[in-house]
Image: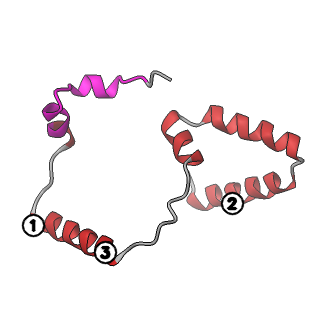
Amino acid sequence: MNPKLTQQQKQQAHGMIERLAPEKLSAVVGLLEVMLDPFDRALAIADIDDEPVTDEDRRDIEASRAWFQQNPGTPFEQAVAELGLSMEEVTNYKDPS
């Protein structure tokens, strides 16, 4: 899909949402909630992390970046296996809610 078209569509959608009456806005929010998968829905309604980044946070972030420059990290499949799960269990997981 054309990224420019997508951005234009998002801007158009935002403009239309801004013009909606409150009762219609709640209907649109309900529709969007149904259209999003559970993970995206949780992200959409999550509180914004507004805590400032501390000097300690910055040091930890830099240490992490430096570590990953020298180490390959752990493949996802290996991490799944170390947790005693199979990739099939992860792939086919259904949220109980």
- Tag 2: residue type? Gln
Q: Nearer the viewer, mark 1 or mark 3?
A: 3
Residue 61 picture location, percent across and down: 27, 69
Q: Which residue is mark 2?
A: 8
In this orientation, which residue lies closer to the viewer: 49 or 21? 49
Inter-mark Cα distance, 1 to 3? 19 Å
Residue at 67%, 39% in the rendered image: 32
Element marked by disc 3: helix
Residue 46, percent from left and from top: 55, 48
Q: Residue at x 32, y 78 (%)?
A: 55
Q: Earlier in the sequence, mark 1 or mark 3?
A: 3
In this rendering, the answer to whether 44 lies above or below 62 is above
Q: Residue 60 placed where, x, y %? A: 25, 69
Q: Few, some or many C-alpha atoms within 10 Å of disc 1 (few <14, some 14-19, many ≥20)?
A: few
Q: Which mark is residue 58?
A: 3
Number of other residues with Cα within 10 Å of mark 2, as a class: few under 14, some 14 to 19, many 20 or more: few
Give whichever of discs 3 and 2 has the lower sequence position. Answer: 2
Which quadrant of the figure has residue 26? top right
Please name the residue shown 21% across and 41% down the image. Answer: 76
| In the depicted structure, whether residue 26 falls above or below residue 4 | above
Residue 92 falls inside the magenta stretch: yes
Disc 3 versus disc 2: nearer the observer = 3
Relative to 38, 92 lies left or right: left
Q: Quick one: label 2 or label 1, which is nearer the N terminus?
A: 2
Residue that label 1 marks: 70
Q: CA distance from mark 2 to mark 1?
A: 41 Å
Q: Amino acid at mark 1?
A: Gln
Residue farthest toward the left in the current orientation of the protein: 70
